[in-house]
Image (tube, grey):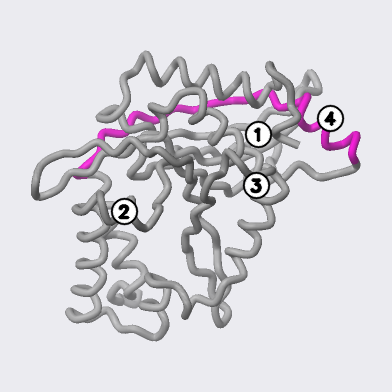
Amino acid sequence: MPVRRQNLEEWFTDHQLQALHRNHFHIPAHLDFDVSKLVAAYAEQDRRLPITAVMVKAMALLAKKHPEVNRTIFRTFLGTWVVEFDHIDVNVPVMIEHEGRRVLSATVVKDADTKTVAQINDEVKVASQRNLADLPIGSHFIANRNNLWNRTKLRLIHWAVWNLPWLYLSKRGGGMAVSSIVQPTAPGFQLRVVSRGPHVWTIGLWTLEADENGRHILRAGVGYDHSALGGEAFITTTHSLNGILNGDSGLDELL
């Protein structure tokens, strides 16, 4: 069996995951949302439900109602800081094709509460078509070797982002994250993973399927940072998000 060293992209992913483990206390949760009304509303307009864009918008609406979900813990060399964002920006990981391989990058949907679902969907699509060479982090992965110099550069970038919350704010980093790898289901098999990130709410979307009663169920996994949000508040906000996706106050903003 061949043995190889991590490439630079693998190393940096590992570096970020270790930092998440050290600095955040994630509690995993599985959430099932009945989005039957939403699916029916899109079908009436002969449109396909853009799941990722709808969840980005739903999270933005949740943040308007419960600003405490739009929050991130920064554990810095000057102590621990809590950033409570006054703008509603949502981080969305996207896959970018580069020379036959797929590289994970991130885009930020800024002011998601003021944008329509169609605008958000277009923005995410455009982000997935970007040139890797034009991205501050992604450009490092193009033909760069996993050596001390390249690792040091990435360490410094990562350190600056997560030790200088004022820099993060100035660059308009998001306060929540939506990850979407929606896959078709197979009989007797279901994949659902809890997504984790540096924010209070990081939600991953996994399957959308019709159950035995004909309801359309969106299954998601959430890693919420208990260091930044209490358990009672998390339960309250999950119920609110469920109400938004169920259309308790109407579906107009999700169409």
Q: Pointer 1 and pointer 3: residues touching (CB < 8 Å)?
A: no
Image position, residue 228 (x, y; %): 28, 30
Instruction: Measure the alpha-carbon separation of dots 1 and 3.
Output: 14 Å
| Element type at mark 3 | loop
Instruction: Measure the alpha-carbon separation of dots 3 and 4.
Output: 20 Å
Disc 2 vs disc 1: which is toward the camera?
2
Q: Which amino acid, mark 1?
A: Gly
Question: Residue at image x 70%, y 33%?
Answer: 253
Disc 2 vs disc 4: which is toward the camera?
2
Q: Tell me which numbered mark, 1 or 3, is placed earlier along the sequence.
A: 3
Magenta-span inclusion, residue 23: yes
Magenta-span inclusion, residue 217: no
Q: Quadrant of residue 240?
A: top right
Q: Residues within 10 Å of mark 3 (few under 14, many from 20)?
A: some
Q: Which mark is residue 168?
A: 2
User: Disc 4 designates what residue?
Assistant: 40
Q: Tell me which numbered mark, 3 or 4, is placed earlier along the sequence.
A: 4
| Element type at mark 4 | helix
Q: Nearer the viewer, residue 72 or 138?
A: 72
Which stretch appears magenta?
Answer: 22-45
Disc 1 vs disc 3: which is toward the camera?
3
Q: Nearer the viewer, residue 71 or 101?
A: 71
Would residue 1 appear left or right of 236 to someone viewing this image?
A: left
Instruction: Measure the alpha-carbon separation of dots 4 and 1.
Output: 26 Å
Would residue 105 appear left or right of 15 to someone viewing this image?
A: right
Would residue 90 appear left or right of 53 to someone viewing this image?
A: left
Quadrant into which the C terminus falls: top right
Q: Which amino acid, mark 3?
A: Gln
User: Disc 1 designates what residue?
Assistant: 188
Q: Which mark is residue 183?
A: 3
Q: Tell me which numbered mark, 4 or 1, is placed earlier along the sequence.
A: 4
Q: Tell me which numbered mark, 2 or 1, is placed earlier along the sequence.
A: 2
